[in-house]
Image (tube, helix red, strand yellow):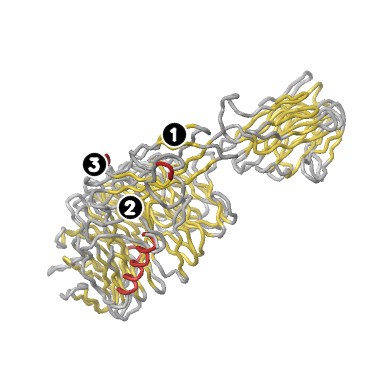
Amino acid sequence: MNFTTWLTSRLRAKKNDSRKHRSCFSLHANQVGWYSLERLEDRTLLSNTGFAFNVGGDGSDSIYDMVVDPQGNSYSIGRYQNTVDFDPGAGVIEHTNSSGNGIFILKTDPNGNVVWAKDIAGTGSISSYSLAIALDAAKNVYASGYFTGVRDFDPGPGVHNLDAGSANDGFLLKLNNAGNFIWATNLASDTGYVQISDLGVDSAGNVYITGAFSGTVDFNPGPGTAELTKTTTTNLFVAKYNSTGAFSWVKQLHGDSDSFTPDMAVSGTGDVFLTVQYKGTMEIDPGPGVFEVTSTEPTEYDLLLMKLNSNGQFQWGHTVGGVNEERSGGIAVDSQGNVYLGARFTYRVDFDPTNAIYQVLTGYNTQFQYTESEVSFIAKYDGNGKIAWAKAFEGGSDPYIDAVETDQYGNVYVTTEHQGLTDLNPGPEEFLVYNEYNEHINLVSLDTDGNFRWADELETYWYNYGLAIGIDQNGSVYVAGSIESYAYADIGMETVNLEKNGGYNDAFLWKLPASGGPMANAGGLYEPEVDTIVELDASATTHPTQDPATLTYEWDFDGDGIFGETGGAAQYGNEVGMHPNFTAVRFYPFLSQRIALKVTDSQGRTSTDYTTVSVQENTQLSTFDNYYRGDYSYGKAVALDGEGNLYNAGVFRGTTDFRNYSVSQNQTSTTGHSMYVTKSNPRGSTIWVKQIDGDDDIEPLGMVTDHTGAVYVVGRFYGSVDLDSGPGTHNFTSAGLGDIFVLKLDKNGNYLWARQFGSTSRDTPGGIDVDQNNNIYITGEFGATVDFDPGSGTYNLTSSGGYDAFVLQLHPDGTFGWAQSFGGIGTDNGQD
């Protein structure tokens, strides 16, 4: 039995044994060591304590939002019913709300001890999911939401009643760090509602709220007036107040169809980022300008992502959407002003606000494409709204992102829920978890570049929700929400067993201690040429307290599970050191070796990272080790796809060797008039070659690729030609001195379709391009009369004299879009 197998068995036995002694609270985990039974992750040997507890009574109790200060004190807001003891330890901090629905605000210290629990009691109802909480730099506590009836917002001996009547009023509350009342205000509509859905505070202590309203609302709680009136179906607002609650500004967004209330993230400088689930058209510039966004489908929800500056001025906004519904799952902003969006999409969504395409697809099983129709994702944008990356969590069904947060280093954390088997690692490795009924709460951490760091889960039964995340300055992660049955929380080498108190659900708080050990970084991707030596670089490895140069670096180059081999056992080079040499041996057609790095510190704490060495061909023969040799060959057009693959089209006669590294791919022209289309990788190696034969000349004159990797070739031919390079036959015959053809192949070179256009004169293409929707545009010249509709319809254009220029649009399936001509009595032509 090797060490890994032994350690896994011991950890599993310890975990199972701990579950036999179930309790609602556990001693702090002073031991060190972190593990996951699904995969031995490397947040090993934890440096501080973790905890987990739940509180509840005989009703429905949950935490809906949470914030953590740098020292590790947590502040939570939630709803409770009837009577609840908010101290999970030996003490009693009991609150009762006789009307059935109370608001609680709870502070705990870094060890999970309850410092105070405050009650906002009253009559009427509250909107649980609207509850939000934030801290300012002085650790004053701000809370918001909306309610009906009468509530006393002073949790101390004083009274500060706010009366909403039967309508929904928004509230904004400020407490000091001891939980004592400072001020509170409500926002009311004359005939409708005010629903505050989120809250944020900037570094100067200014407070921002967002939500929805109807009727007419005065957003200035002071002596002045700042009224907004509902004008369309959707009316959203963003408002700013200073630390005393004095009004600064309010802005209105409106749309012609339904929307959900917004989620919001506020940067330290006061930039406001909003995400809204909407459909139809929305006007999102609250200033004098006009900036409208429209959902991809009028009856399906898309996501709006937008930014206002600290003065409420519109900066940018765009839609993240596809042909089906998208659902928001949270938003966060890091210290550099990058914004992170979590959500769920169905089938296809475009994340890029520019004309470029940055899509993640579902329904397939290739890169960025998944086997299920619904996928949860996290996407990162810079402060100007430019997409940095988007990552999806593959597999499972009914997925959701419940919360998103970032730490001081730009690492991102999300809580997810789903059914079935799901891979929580969006990279090349796997981290598989299985949930039968959406019962487990999964916590995933990615680095600032979207690479997987680690994942863990609160293993629970029945439906449970991780609705809030917080991170302290040591990197410890806090998760809060609700459980409907019982749960097992790993807090190091201890497992805390949580069991609800008898009601519908309990509120819980779970802390995962930060890693105190090294964080390995193997560098890469490495792409040396064959028979060369590449120096690996682990210098990006970090440690919170030790110099990385003093750590021990051991590698596994050959995948045998043995780290640090030297001498004869190390076939690719000695596997030790921060900068070892890796020998890139010949391995046809490529060597793509997954290698591992294990880093150990002076206390025996370890961390492992993975990278890839991909050996490329030697390029001494030419810029590309790829050339065509035969009786006659002539390249006419080239194009690149989004992955850097090169496509080339030309003509050849006789037998031509379309040369690949150490392999010849011979093609023979049987008619003496042949066209070729080739695809080569970024290093120039031929991936495939396709041959098109005719009984007279055929000449490619332009080509382009779309975002799927499909290639379009446009050219001219005489006589008859079979444009299907596969086993099928698709013959075309020119009408005159030369007709135009368009040929579409998929990324593997398979024939998709071909079209012909021509007159009794000579017709010649001058260029081809595609748009973001894969519509095809062709320009060139034509004489006489040409029917530009390749289908059953007719769309004739006739030249004015000699040759006229034309522009033609075809749909992605080759059907007619439109055509126009331009010209006089002379010769006019369209060129790329």
Return the residue nearer the eye: 792 or 44. Answer: 44
Q: SS for tag 1?
A: strand
Residue 227: mark: 2
Q: Residues within 10 Å of mark 1 (few under 14, many from 20)?
A: some
Q: CA distance from mark 1 to mark 3?
A: 25 Å
Residue 401 placement: quadrant: bottom left
Q: SS for tag 3?
A: loop
Label 1: which residue?
Answer: 534
Return the residue nearer the eye: 100 or 423. Answer: 423
Residue 697 is left or right of residue 34, and the answer is right
In front: mark 1 or mark 3? Answer: 1
The N terminus sits in image quarter: bottom left
Q: Residues within 10 Å of mark 2 (few under 14, many from 20)?
A: few
Residue 800 is left or right of residue 372, and the answer is right
Q: CA distance from mark 1 to mark 2?
A: 67 Å
Q: Earlier in the sequence, mark 3 or mark 2?
A: 2
Looking at the image, can residue 699 be seen?
yes
- The kind of residue tagged 2 is Glu
Q: Earlier in the sequence, mark 1 or mark 2?
A: 2
Q: Which residue appears farthest toward the left when viewing the image?
A: 157
Return the residue nearer the eye: 738 or 710. Answer: 710
Q: Earlier in the sequence, mark 1 or mark 3?
A: 1
Q: Residues within 10 Å of mark 3 (few under 14, many from 20)?
A: few
Label 3: which residue?
Answer: 547
Looking at the image, can residue 194 be seen?
no
Q: SS for tag 2?
A: strand
